[in-house]
Amino acid sequence: MVSKTEEEQVNRLENQVENGGGGAWEYLCLVRKLKLRRSDKVLKHGFSILNDPKKRSALGPEGRLEAMLLEAKGLLAEAEKAYSSLLEENQFDQVIHKRRVAIAKAQGNLSGAIEWLNKYLEMYKQAAFCYEELILSQPTIPLYHLAYADVLYTLGGLENLHAAKKYYAATIDLTGGKNIRALFGICLCASAVGQLAKGRNKEDKESSELQSLSAVALEKLYKQQSPSKLSLLTSTLRNFKL
Amino acid sequence: MGGESRYEIHQNAYIKLVLHALNHRTSAVNAVLLGRSAAAAVEIVDSVPLFHSQIGLLPPLEIALSMIDEYYGEKGLSIVGYFHANERHDDLELAGVAKNIGDHIARYFPQAPVLLLDNKKLESLSKGKERSPVMQLYTKDASCSWKLVGSDGNSQLTFKEPSANIVLLDYISSEKWKDIIDFDDHLDDISK
């Protein structure tokens, strides 16, 4: 997984960054690449990079546009190359950083097909990492919370499911209760948690209340916008209630 | 698993799959195949296009499969297979996520095929030379991995209506793909 030299490199960079030397960017890239768990440090340095206005790129608006055009055309690999070279010149451009993260996530599937048929989960962890950074930089965008919740749910495990539930709830909060995917997400989480933790009764009451609230909200929305599908929804929801 | 498996795909199902892929050319798309198992072959009667974004995520997939099961169960059909189209034009490798979903479906229906869109065949379609379905057929072999089935193998994918490709061409030229709504669209706007 992580070779000794890489480990040493990370530790060296970590020390350098902690002590105020430069290299925060390389440190972050390396951490992400090696998928190490250094969340608190990453948060700290990520913030410092993203929030430093001095370091936003002055040069490169044409270069950026070109790269975005490539990305929009779907030529992700070329776009990624363009972004990478732009980033080399302008290390702290937040916009490019964001685009690259989005590409990394989209490309996760591509490189997966080539490299890691067996390392399925690692891609999701990488995606989770990227989303964490996105949410950090722009916490009011419900889309990020929603996508992060989806990734957490897909990763699975009791802890992730609980976290996913919270992010779905955050999405519902941010969208005023209108986001269908988030409402469904809550129902799914509740039933998945119920399946995993059959013995524990502590959180049942709160979580089943949340689930029935979401179910009611879903039914109301379907009634308003798509009454023909209402009965389908009801029977589907029944399946989730176990 | 293994042995003779013939799959017959109805025109309706087939056309929906290809049009959906054409509707979202720049992303990977997928769909489930509905049908029933008959003595001679597995009949793929209908298909439901699923997603064109964030395909690998579980929650929308689970909801979709659950709803589809309910809906078609009443009609006497069940989920019999899975269709996938890769994001890149010349990518003919069966992606991990496709295999996973295929495995999941195969747990309930062991003969479930996975169909992968073959873009090259799709292109030659417009030259009017293609008679067979523009997709590759994968089935699970004895070692429980997905194997590509050649046209000389035991398993085959055939059309129920031989004119399917011609009808498809017609729909393509009249840009019918714009009318295809998939599950992603539904989740974004449930009135669809």
Image: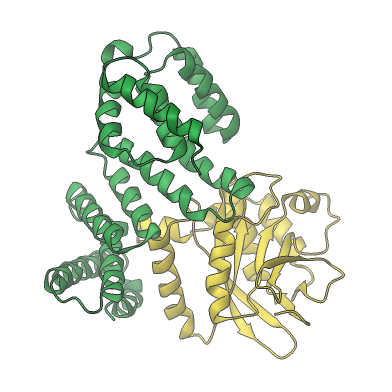
Q: Find residue A33 and report its horizontal and vertical position in percent.
A: 46, 36
Residue A222 at least partly seen = yes
Which quadrant of the structure image shows residue B100?
Answer: bottom right
Q: Residue at x 39, y 68 (%)?
A: B63
Q: Residue at x 45, y 61 (%)?
A: B183
Q: Residue furthest bottom?
A: B39
Q: Is residue B37 above or below residue A62?
A: below
Report the number of numbered marks. Answer: 0
Palette colour of chain A:
green
In the image, taking residue A74 as reference, residue A160 lies left or right, namely left
Residue B176 at least partly seen = no
Coloration mode: by chain
Q: Find residue A212 and report its horizontal and vertical position in percent.
A: 18, 72
The quadrant the C terminus of chain A occupies is bottom left
Which quadrant of the structure image shows residue B113?
Answer: bottom right
Which quadrant of the structure image shows residue B38?
Answer: bottom right
